[in-house]
Image (tube, grey):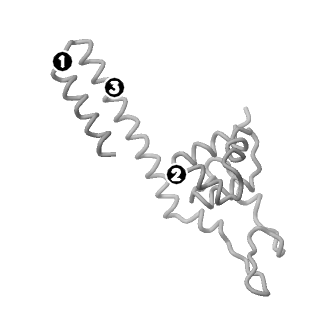
Amino acid sequence: MEQHKGKIVEEAIKKSGFRMKALAKKLGIARNTLYTRLKEADIKDTFIIEIGKIIYYDFSNDFPGIYEKNEPKGNAESPGYEPKGDRHEYIDESAIIRDPHFTQLQALNKKYLKLMEDYNKLLNILIILANDNELVGIKQEIMAFIENEKQED
């Protein structure tokens, strides 16, 4: 089955914490256009790479070979070239994305999100147990704890 690239990219954007409005602005498109493109199952690799550069996300785990297939060919019109006065200079932005520190940060971010999801599941299980066993005191403590956590965010 073919991957739905739009959903994968959208999930990466959400995990990065980057706001859609800010991302659309950096991409030079309207927010609605961004949402429309993310609904597409087959987004162009160049668009995915551009998003990755902005949100500092390495899509090579999600789409193996994406960077190799889309490396600049070595002419001034390539996306890796930027004008520098009257000359063009090659900027290897893919090196930024493949930086091991960003890769490590992404791995830690995934672990953190998984931990938070498990934490929330555990709290929900505790509430269910408290309800089923009519443990009013424990339920009140859990609800107060959750309310306190919401206020800290």
| Residue located beneath label 1 in the image | 136
Name the residue located 48 percent from the left edge and 52 percent from the top edge: 107
Q: CA distance from mark 1 to mark 3?
A: 15 Å
Q: Which mark is residue 124?
A: 3
Name the residue located 67 percent from the left edge and 48 percent from the top edge: 63
Name the residue located 34 percent from the left edge and 35 percent from the top edge: 119
Q: Amino acid at mark 1?
A: Val
Q: CA distance from mark 3 to mark 2?
A: 25 Å
Instruction: Residue 8: give x, y in percent of width and height.
Output: 63, 42
Does residue 26 sit above or below 116 in this rendering?
below
Say whether residue 124 is left or right of residue 113: left
Q: Amino acid at mark 2?
A: Ser
Instruction: Residue 146: give x, y in percent of width and height.
Output: 28, 34
Say whether disc 1 or disc 3 marks the residue closer to the N-terminus: 3
Instruction: Residue 116: give x, y in percent of width and height.
Output: 38, 40
Q: Could you say which is closer to the camera, residue 28 or residue 96?
A: 28
Q: Dot 3, crowdedness within 10 Å: few (<14), some or many (≥20)? A: few
Q: CA distance from mark 1 to mark 2?
A: 39 Å
- Element under disc 2: helix
